[in-house]
Image: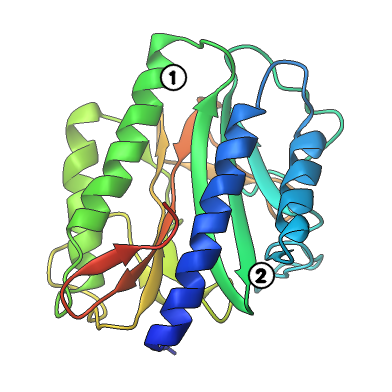
Amino acid sequence: MITIKTEEEIKTLHEGGRRLAAILNELARRAVPGVSSTELDKIGQELAEQNGDKPAFLGYRPKGVKIPYPASVCISINDEVVHGIPSDEKILQEGDVVAIDMGLIHGGLITDSAVTVVVGKGDEAAQKLIKATKGALEAGIKAIRPGGHVGDIGAAIEKYVEPYGFGQAEGLAGHGVGYKVHEDPFVPNNGKKGEGELLKPGMVIAIEPMLNEGTGKVTFDRDGYTVRTKDGKRSAHFEHTIAITKSGYLVLTR
Ligand code: MG
Ligand code: MG
């Protein structure tokens, strides 16, 4: 079911989104060689709780998965596309491509956002992958208009990505968000303009393109969460939570 948030709720989500953006900024800054993904996860949790907020993913159990998510932040390194589980054994190395994805509960409402950074300087190909993924997110956001469709977003992302030749992680997409981590509608990263659910003022959605250096084919680890590229090449992920307004849209997680 698609939910419509009140203006008051969108204000609360905007404040939560601002706080989440600050946390992600800090995590990105601290993604340096020698740091484990568990350390980053703990920093994320502490920064949320310091402000009286809660991480939204900790203990969240998506449909079809047996165990609740065991951490506050999803940290996906290199061939991990999304939902990488932090571990003491995952120590960041110079050149790693690291996607940092977090949900925050502020005032009872949830925002969801992700950034990808390269550890240290990295290579040119990594920078290009990250730049294209960020650009794909911005292209998707710019396609939003009240009275338009979720397909407009997918079509804009697909068109933006095409000249790069990067694969788009198959079967993964954006979603409604706010009262729950995952709500309707499905927000595709490809498709046709004019297709899918209508975009109405008060809807709050997460747009999240995931680009792979190679094929879009992915596999799931036995942990039920970690999604990897099938060919072992690297992947990047960017995400914002956005409210549809009467006149356009408002990015809540900048
Ligand atoms: Mg996310
Ligand atoms: Mg999301």
Q: Earlier in the sequence, mark 2 or mark 1?
A: 2
Q: Residue, x 39% and y 69% (percent of image)?
A: 205
Whether ligand 2 has any atom under 8 Å from the Cβ at mark 2 is answered as no
Looking at the image, which is closer to me, 74 or 166? 74
Whether label 2 touches label 1, CB < 8 Å: no
> To which quarter of the image does residue 203 belong?
bottom left
Looking at the image, which is closer to me, 80 or 179? 179
Mark linked to residue 76 = none
Three-letter amino acid code at disc 1? Ala
Q: Residue, x 25% and y 54% (percent of image)?
A: 140
Please state the total of marks drawn on the protein image: 2
Residue mark closest to the camera, 2 vs 1: 1
Looking at the image, which is closer to me, 51 or 10? 51
Looking at the rendered image, the quarter that the N terminus falls into is: bottom left
Circle 2 — which element?
Answer: loop
Three-letter amino acid code at disc 2? Pro
Give coordinates of residue 97: x percent, y percent. 55, 25
Give coordinates of residue 107: x percent, y percent. 62, 77
Is residue 157 shown left or right of residue 91?
left
Give coordinates of residue 226: x percent, y percent. 67, 46
Mark 2, residue position:
62
Mark 1, residue position:
126
Is residue 38 shown left or right of residue 166?
right
